[in-house]
Image (cartoon, helix red, strand yellow):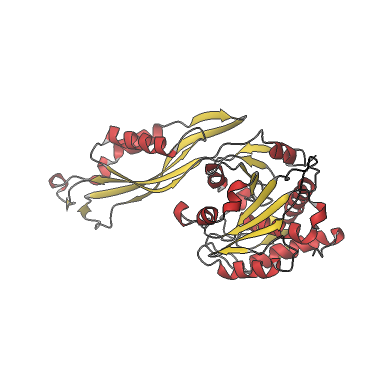
Amino acid sequence: MSWVAASDIVPHLDQTLLWLCSVDSPIGEERVLCDAVVERLQKVTLAAPIRRYGDSVVVPWLRGKLDADGKPAPHIVLAGHLDTVRTENGPARIEGDRCFGSGSSDMKSGLAVMLALAESLSPSDVPFNVTLVFYAREEGPFHENELGPVLEQDAELRNVNLAVCMEPSDNKLHLGCVGSIHAHVTFIGKTSHSARPWQGVNAVYKAAPLLLRLEQLKPIEVTLGGMTYRTVTAVTQANDGGRGRNVVPDRFVLNLNHRFSPDRTLEGEQQYLRELVSAVDPTAEIEFTDLSPSAPPFRDHPLVQQLVVCGVRAIEPKQAWTDVARFAALGVAAINFGPGENAQAHQKNESTSLPLVHEGYAIMRRWLTTDVG
């Protein structure tokens, strides 16, 4: 069943995005929105029943498509996360040509395009096999992201030809992604009264050589598939363990966030950080708290090249982490493309451009209705 006429698609997109933003879904509280999306998609003609995993769903939209040689047509996944970060936002609303609301850019604009495609395209319009994936907990630690267990349990998703993560990219094609490591580095000293600091060992001072070394580090650049990625390391948090203001601290913890290019491995970068810390203080302890792999750009993939000619605004490297890495780890080509505004992601009073959403839908519709030959 398809009930949205081409002439009605613009207001339909706007109202779909507004509807999505009106259902709060901060990370960990996605169930209400997941239920609502399932209820909505049950009105669409699907190839098979929706499969649910926690607060995530796999939607078998189109199946049984063949190419010109009678072989199975490519299988494409469109994936988007239901959750948003917890920020201060007013009520969901449309003002002029913008939609305001938590997640309007990251990434309910992408979800709106996914829903609108399923609600406006008839099966005969699309020569591909297509699956929609709506999943929870993307905005938190790698190990809590529900796309991980979804991919582990749903065998069909591990054998697709291309996955498109509808992350906010201003309708630009963002290829690959850098890996990410979070690590706690703990420096150990000895407490004393701050009036007699010579009786203690200040753990904060022990961190100074590493802080200086990190300040001097230059980004390490590598070009892959015409894309330049940068390996960088930054301190993002520091904590003295809550000692009093008149106590020389015996413990000081830094959180390092290390981003690494797609030619590097998690194991290799963990060893790099161990050696970086050990070189300035062999007694410092390092604990890895979040490990996310990188993903290659897949620029030469024929389906990616086909999307490029359908009107994407630009082709850029993804100097951040996204779930394309989860697909890539399974041998599935994956890319980032979405209509949300990258600069609006995680912002207070988040909003997105409605014309960008309309354009993103048009690009995806053009791509999905292109003859596979």
Residue 322 image position (x, y, % from top left): 55, 47
Residue 368 image position (x, y, % from top left): 76, 48
> Which of 128 and 173 lies nearest the eye of the viewer?
128
Q: Is residue 10 above or below residue 173?
A: below
Identify the image quadrant of residue 244. Answer: bottom left
Whether residue 92 is visible here, answered yes or no, is no
Looking at the image, which residue sits at the far front? Answer: 70
> Looking at the rendering, in which quadrant would you find the C terminus?
top right
Looking at the image, which residue sits at the far right? Answer: 7
> Which of 239 and 112 lies nearest the eye of the viewer?
112
> Which of 210 and 310 lies nearest the eye of the viewer?
310
Residue at position x 62%, y 69% in the image: 23
Q: Is residue 48 left or right of residue 34?
A: right
> Which of 193 and 201 lies nearest the eye of the viewer?
201
> Looking at the rendering, in which quadrant would you find the N terminus?
bottom right
Residue 294 image position (x, y, % from top left): 51, 40
Whether residue 363 is visible here, answered yes or no, is yes
Residue at position x 20%, y 46% in the image: 189
Q: Is residue 24 above or below residue 331?
A: below
Residue 135 image position (x, y, % from top left): 57, 59
Q: Is residue 144 left or right of residue 71?
A: left
Q: How many marks?
A: 0
Identify the image quadrant of residue 282. Answer: top left
